[in-house]
Amino acid sequence: MAPTSDGVVLAMQTGEVGFLADREITTQATIPVSTGGERGLLGVAIHPDDAERWFFYYTNPEDGGTVVSEFAAPGGVINPESEEVLFTVAQPAANHNGGMIQFGPDGMLYAGVGDGGGGGDQFGNGQNTDTPLGGILRLDVDGEDIAPGDNPGFGAPELWLYGLRNPWRFDWSGDRLVIADVGQSAYEEITVVGIDDGGGNLGWPTMEGTHCYENPGCDSIGILPVHEIEHGDNGTCSITGGVTYEGDAIAGLAGHFLYSDFCGGYLRSITVDGNEVETYQWIEESLGSVVTFGEDEDGEVLISADGSLLRVVASN
C-alpha cells in the first residue's frame, strides 16, 4: 500500500493495481506476475517528489525472479505500458521472496529481499554479500546507476544490509528503519537500524533472533533484534510488520510500531526509546491471516487480512 493525496494505491498479489478512495476499490491495471507460493505483485511505493512515478516489486511470470520497476502514473492512473525495469535478481525458490519497497529519508528506494527460500538458508545467501538475496537493498531511482555510490561497497552493489531471512515488511520512521524479519522455526524478530547503519549484518543464519541457529555454541554476531516473539505465543509463526503510527486520530499510539502475525492474527505494538523497549497487545483474537500494513492519506493505519482491508480506530 502507498498513500497519495486522495487515496491509497494497492498492490494485489494477483497483479492487480488497485486504488482505494472513499472506501471503494477500483482496479487501474494488471501487471503480469507469477503467483505461485509467496510470489506475486508484492510491493508499491510512490516517489516522494513526484506523485506520478510509481514503483512496484513483483515476481517475473517467465522465470520467477524478482523485479523492481517504475511506471508512469499521469493524473494518478498507472500507464501499464510505461514500465522501466530498474532491478532484477533470480530466485531459486518460490518462498522468501521479500516484497517490501519504501523510500527512505535520504530519497533512496529501499527493498527487502529474502534469502532465496527453502529452509535454513539452504542456498547459503544470508552471510554472502556477493548476492542481493537475504538483505535490504538501497537503490537510486534518480541516478545514472541504480546502486548509489555511497552504498557499503559489497560484491552486490545494491546491498545495504545483509543477514536477513525474509524481511517481508519494514517501515521508515524518521531516520530509523524498523524491520520485521520472518523467523525459521522458533523466533520472529523486530530489528531497528539507523540511516547510518548501512553495511550492517543482522545475523541470519548464524542467529535466529537473539539465539544461535546453525550452531548452538555460536558467538553472537550482527545487529540483534530489539524484540522477538517465540513461536507458539498466541499462535505466532510468521511475523507481519508493520508500520510506525504517525496519524492524529489515536494519540496514545504515537510512535508505536504496530505488527501482527500471519498465523496468530493479533494486533500488537512496541515502542523503542534507546535501550528501553515496551510491548503492547491491543487485539488478542485473530484478525485473520494478516499479510501487510499500510497507511491512508491521513496517516491512519490499514491492515490487509484474508482479502479484506481493515482500519485501526480508537475504541469507544
Image (tube, rainbow, N blue to C red):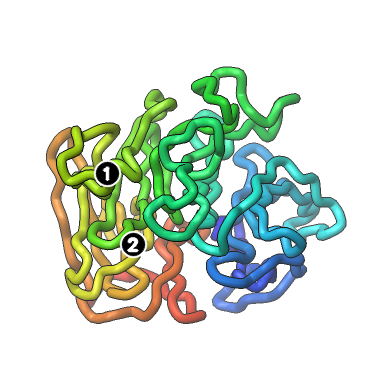
Q: Of discs 1 and 2, which sits in the foreground?
A: 1
Which numbered disc flags the more N-terminal residue, 1 or 2? 1
Q: Residue at x 36, y 52 (%)?
A: 181
Hey, what amino acid is under mark 1? Met
Q: Please, is residue 309 above or below residue 187 in the view?
A: below
Local packing at callout 2 (Cα closer than 10 Å; few below 14, some 14-19, many 20+) is many
Q: Residue beneath label 1, please?
A: 207
Hey, what amino acid is under mark 2? Ile
Q: Residue beneath label 2, please?
A: 239
Q: Secondary structure at mark 2?
A: strand
**Mark 1 near mark 2, Cβ–Cβ under 8 Å?**
no
Local packing at callout 1 (Cα closer than 10 Å; few below 14, some 14-19, many 20+) is many
Apparent side of residue 63 relative to residue 188 in the rendered image (left or right): right
Q: Residue at x 63, y 71 (%)?
A: 35
Q: Is residue 4 visible?
A: no
Q: Position of residue 102 (x, y in %)?
A: 53, 45
User: In whole angstroms, how far apart are the C-alphas of marks 1 and 2?
Assistant: 17 Å
Closer-to-camera residue (241/215) = 215
Q: Position of residue 61 (x, y in %)?
A: 73, 64
Closer-to-camera residue (104/61) = 61
Q: Residue at x 44, y 66 (%)?
A: 302
Apparent side of residue 131 relative to residue 194 in the rendered image (left or right): right
The count of marks equals: 2
Quarter of the image where the N terminus is located: bottom right
Q: Position of residue 201 (x, y in %)?
A: 36, 32
Quarter of the image where the C terminus is located: bottom left
Residue 223 is tagged as none
Q: Position of residue 239 (x, y in %)?
A: 33, 62
Q: Secondary structure at mark 1?
A: strand
Apparent side of residue 240 relative to residue 108 in the rendered image (left or right): left
